Image (cartoon, helix red, strand yellow):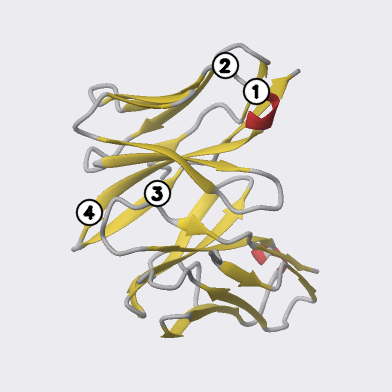
Amino acid sequence: DAGVIQSPRHEVTEMGQEVTLRCKPISGHNSLFWYRQTMMRGLELLIYFNNNVPIDDSGMPEDRFSAKMPNASFSTLKIQPSEPRDSAVYFCASRAGYSNQPQHFGDGTRLSIL
Amino acid sequence: DQQVKQNSPSLSVQEGRISILNCDYTNSMFDYFLWYKKYPAEGPTFLISISSIKDKNEDGRFTVFLNKSAKHLSLHIVPSQPGDSAVYFCAARENSGGYQKVTFGTGTKLQVIP
């Protein structure tokens, strides 16, 4: 039973470069979430998809961030251009519908922008 | 504006004793609360939850208490074990605009000392 799969696990790049984080949700889950974890702010919700449609992107910090979900089994979070303050751990989570089922998280991508 | 607050960034407890992790919230629209546990280099995993219509939910060594009037919930772990050492996130859910939005706290790092 595969969980949420994120890639890469680690990414180190120079500021100004484009960064793409990838996520494969659990099969059958129709809600997908992108979070950013920092020491100061904990887990922040960036964007939330339901049935591949973005529902709430109010947490996306600025226009440099964008997310897509072209189909039910794949999502990307892109940062262009990247800045050192974007360094954080980014988590993807998925959930089955509107039930009281909890979100299932991937193991995260640790992003370092130099 | 942090709607879910975990004011203790860390907690140390002796093995076998009780661990009490606290969480406060400000949004009275939250109707469901969850606790997640996170080990280093892994994503958070669901631990226990409670609906706002209850004041207590118990699952093995883990009990969550909810005090709606005080907007406070707590997670009790009895007896604490070294394997419980992890970061614990409190999360709260609200129905917003036809969908469910979950807000996480900043986490409390629990260390159980053998």
Q: Are marks 4 and 3 on the same chain?
A: yes
Q: Do residues under tags 1 and 4 come within 8 Å of each other at their CB atoms? A: no
Which residue is more in the foreground, B72 or A58?
B72
Give the mark nearer the N terminus: 4 vs 2.
Answer: 2
Secondary structure under tag 4 reads: strand
Q: Do residues under tags 4 and 2 come within 8 Å of each other at their CB atoms? A: no
Q: Residues within 10 Å of mark 2 (few under 14, many from 20)?
A: some
Give the mark nearer the N terminus: 1 vs 4.
Answer: 1
Q: CA distance from mark 2 to mark 3?
A: 28 Å
Q: CA distance from mark 4 to mark 2?
A: 35 Å
Reading the image, the residue beneath label 2 is B79
Q: CA distance from mark 1 to mark 4?
A: 35 Å
Q: Are marks 1 and 4 on the same chain?
A: yes
- Amino acid under label 3? Thr
Q: Residue B40, percent across and down? A: 70, 46
Reading the image, the residue beneath label 4 is B95
Residue A52 horizontal side relative to residue A110, left or right:
left
Which residue appears at 35% of the width and 71% of the height?
Answer: A30
Secondary structure under tag 2 reads: loop
Reading the image, the residue beneath label 3 is B103
Q: Which mark is residue A60?
A: none
Q: Do residues under tags 2 and 1 come within 8 Å of each other at their CB atoms? A: yes
